[in-house]
Amino acid sequence: MAEPVVHLDNVFKRYGGFTAVNGVSFDVHPGEIYGFLGPNGAGKTTTLRMMLDIIAPTSGTLRILGSASAIPVRRRIGYLPEERGLYKKMKAAEAISYFAQLRGLSRPLARKRAMELLTQFGLEEFARSKCEALSKGMAQKVQLLSTIAHEPELLILDEPFSGLDPINQQTLEGLIRSQRDAGRTIIFSTHVMQHAERLCDRFLIMAHGEKRFEGTMREARAAFAQRIHVRTTASADALRAVGGVASIRVEETGDDETTFEIELIDEADPQGFLERLVASGVRVSRFEQAGATLHDIFVSLAGDEAPEERRPQLTEAAE
Amino acid sequence: MKQIILIAWREYRQYVFSRGFLLFLIMFPLGFIGVSAAMAVAENSKPTRYFVIYDETGLYTDDILEEIEDRWRYALLSAWDAYARGFVTDAGEPLPAPFAPGEIDRQRIEAFIAAGGADAAATVAAARLKPGAPPFAPPRRSFQHIGATDALADVTSLAEAEEELRPYLKQDRLIPTARGQKPLFAAILIPAAFNGEEGGAPAQYWSKNLTDNELASRVSSALDSALKRQRYAALGVGDDEILRVEAIDAPMESFRPDRAPEEAQLDLQDRIETSLPAAMTYMLLVIIFGAGNLLLTNTIEERSNKIVEILLSSVTANQLMMGKLLGIGAVGLTMPAIFVAGGIGLSATIETGAEQSVGAVIMAALFSSNLLAVYLFYFICAYLIFAMIFLAIGAISNSLQDAQSYMGPVMLLVFAPLPFMILVFQNPNGLVATVLTWIPIYTPYAVMMRAAADPPLWEIIGATALMLAFAIILMRTMGRIFRQAILVASPPKMRDVWRLAKKEKA
């Protein structure tokens, strides 16, 4: 297997007595879209900044594009920070060209790329507009174009979807896919699970500075307990009496019927559970087997209410 | 290095190629010219101010009028010299004395008037005028004495004069003059007992205008002279002798002991050489203040706009810092460089001819010695020391309000040497100069001020080494604050700044 584009091994970042990143390890492979998920304050941005050598780790090993520091390979990286801005008085094309030049492009080439990208994304008429005159969405596009203008091998996007309307979110998803199709590796952080679910080849979930999961969606679902939704006139106790139920929760209450979300014990087979239900005379008007969504997994792993005993089990399963 | 230049160039362009800067560049000299012109217009458009004298002694009216006339003659000759410098051609025969522009003293004024005054001067100069030269316009008389006036016709005492003149002085009524009814500006009342002796009565100056003291001071000066002349006369000194004594204007020339006798006399270049350090030092203060503010606002903007993280993913914090220092430093130098170059160019253009132009002398003073190199070196040192402080303050502030709490002490630090500079200028190798030289943040100012006065070499080398060591430590400390604080979302508290200044921890 090719050398990982990014490799972190037991990386810590401490600020005095506070541990922002707690022994995080993961690899990002060439050509993949890698999601970086976690609630606010999980340590995502700190980890990304350490990857870029904007801040130094307290301990641990970090390699990026084959280098122990991002500084020598900065020109091969494109970074869009979570909190981003533009020089208000700079024109859009000038801003893209300036950042591309800072990342190593010659002035004529940077200008050419800036115009090409603005045209490609329908912003050519705003090329000479000052950044302060652009709408928020347009400014965000310009910021993104500044990140890719020098055609980096590795794109690191910190919360790239925040603040974008649905249309621009779709455009950005398309851009990320097209960058991956062009052979680039993309790491992006988000807490909007739909984007991650649609885009990521693999993802990492962080919470409280720790890694809670790393792997594919399939691996995450496999590691998660089976859930089924049952609409019936029977009571929760009647369902529990059928056997194989780990937990049961009322999802929706109707006039006669109630919808339950049932979590089966690990070895239970949903098909066998249905057969036992029918055999026990329970009248069922809906039976739906659902895999865990990324949202469920995220909330379960990163939410404070997540059961403690589940976390090591899932992390170990992924690793 | 390319990144540093790119950042510096962006910073430079942002300010120097902005409309505001260009406008200021145009407006500043225009404003200067405008203010000068407005002052000249205001002076010329001042109405002639009328005054009366009621002199019970009958002794002093002529002295007062003579004094006022003398001042007008001085103004007349000054105006003539300025006219001759501007409009009389350098080709051909120069103007003969006393019409040729030169030093103005009592002898020349008397010679000028005796030779026919402005009319004669204009006649002599007529053939030598440049094409299109306007005719010479003598300055207006500021004050006009009203001799015989009906207002004082029946007055027999000082009290009556005061009573009679009061409505005119309050300008409730206009006073009749040869040019019609005019407002009365002032009245000088000299009582019979006025003699300058102890117990004698004082002269009185009456006027509604309490701010314009010009006439009062002329009257006072005339009365002083008159009383002194009376005393000389009482001592048996003849009138001619008194006039000769009064005309004495002690000639004095200045020499430098460190030069050969034939070159020892101080000339314009010497005076400029000794004044340049002071000019450069004040310029340095202005630039540090201006550039420091730019660095501060600019860093705060990048911090609050969140541009800084994008920058730091492309360049190191040190490169960003160096680029900013370079760019803003160049902005700071641009304005004085333009004004100095413009000033030298202008003076070189205007003052051509036999006399060496001031511009040429300044150029000679700057380039004939190592002064310029010395200035530049200390200029850079001082800029780096203070700019780093401003940069660090910018990095720990999210807004100008945040920065205010740090700016007070810093501004005090920047401008603290200002009151002492005059002492250093007057005595470049004195105690104050020596003390300031050994305080690292003021070494550049002090050495620049002393540069032309041959200070002890060991002192300069020692103080400079100390300053460089201090500058390096300061740059490293402030650099650490900048690097560590620039990405922290909330500005650190005052007590945390010390922690940031300490050695960086991974």
Image (cartoon, grey):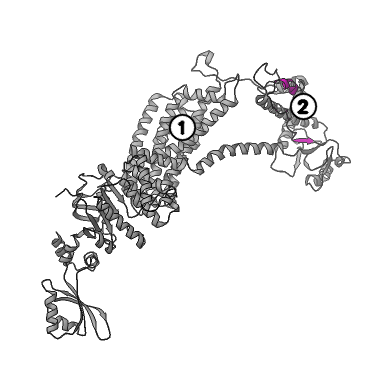
Q: Callout 2 environment at 10 Å: few (<14), some (14 to 19), or many (20+)?
A: some
Picture coordinates of residue B418, whole percent (x, y): 49, 37
The secondary structure type at the circle numbered 1 is helix
Q: In the drawing, does residue B330 fall left or right of residue A272?
A: right
Going 34% across and 34% down the picture, which residue do you hit?
A: B469
Figure check: B80 above or below B190: above
**Label 1, label 2: how far apart the Cα atoms are:** 48 Å
Q: Is residue B464 visible?
A: yes
Please say whether residue A194 is one of the residues in the magenta stretch.
no
Amino acid type, label 1: Val
Q: Which residues are magenta?
A: B120-144
| Nearest to the observer: residue A139 or residue B212 | A139
Res. B230 mark: 2
Q: Which residue is mark 1?
A: B432
Q: In the drawing, does residue A70 fall left or right of residue A136?
A: left
Q: Callout 1 environment at 10 Å: few (<14), some (14 to 19), or many (20+)?
A: some
Q: Which is nearer the N-term, disc 1 or disc 2?
A: 2
Picture coordinates of residue B134, whole percent (x, y): 71, 29
Chain bearing tag 2 is B
The secondary structure type at the circle numbered 2 is helix
